[in-house]
Amino acid sequence: MSIPSSSHPSLQKPAPTSNPPTSNITTTPTTTSPPPTPQTNPLEAKKIASLQAKITALQVQIQETEEKQKEVDAKLKHTDTQATVKAHIKLLHDYNEIRDVGQGLMGIIADTKGVRVRDVYQDFGVGEGD
């Protein structure tokens, strides 16, 4: 004769005797202050306005350079290859200088605003390929 396992005292699981311990440590949320805004700091507002004026001037300069490039491209169709290469190298050099200044200004704006450079690029509509 066999004894059912559920009725045999050695095979039954003991009942839990207490609840698991709880921690008495409480945490306080940390707060960080938002970056200063132009409304709170007039000096930064002037810096931002100055930088935005420089960016606008650089954008105009880029447009002028692109127009010159179109004119040069039209002229280059009737010139020799060495002159074409030299002209393109000059245009690339001009473009790279303008781009470097623009990126530097974007970095300064990001530092001033306390945000990432990527966020500033998005604010000005600059894509990754630009």
Image (cartoon, rainbow, N blue to C red):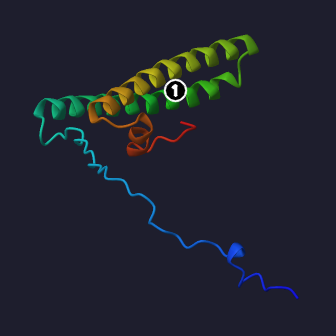
Q: Which residue is drawn at 32% across and 29% down?
A: 111
Q: Quadrant of the N terminus?
A: bottom right
Q: What secondary structure is found at the residue carrying circle 1?
A: helix
Q: Which amino acid does label 1 sit on?
A: Lys
The total number of labels drawn is: 1
Residue 6, image quadrant: bottom right
Q: Residue at x 41, y 21 (%)?
A: 101
Choose between 21 and 125: the one closer to the eye.
21
Say left or right for 125 vs 82.
Answer: left
Choose between 83 and 20: the one closer to the eye.
20
Q: Which residue is drawn at 55% across and 16% down?
A: 93
Q: Position of residue 56 (x, y in %)?
A: 33, 34
Whether 86 is drawn above or below 25: the answer is above
Whether 117 is drawn above or below 2: the answer is above
Whether 20 is drawn above or below 66: the answer is below
Residue 50, image quadrant: top left
Q: Position of residue 130 (x, y in %)?
A: 53, 36
Whether 2 is drawn above or below 83: the answer is below
Q: Where is residue 19 in the image (x, y as percent from the top left)?
A: 44, 66
Q: Where is residue 32 in the image (x, y as percent from the top left)?
A: 25, 42
- List the single residue furthest toward the bottom: 1
Residue 9, image quadrant: bottom right
Say left or right for 76 vs 43.
Answer: right
- List the single residue furthest toward the right: 1
**Few, some or many residues within 10 Å of mark 1 (<14, 14–19, 20+):** few
Say left or right for 108 vs 46.
Answer: right
Say left or right for 79 vs 95.
Answer: right
Q: Which residue is drawn at 38% across and 45% down?
A: 123
Task: Kindly identify which residue carries mark 1.
Answer: 68
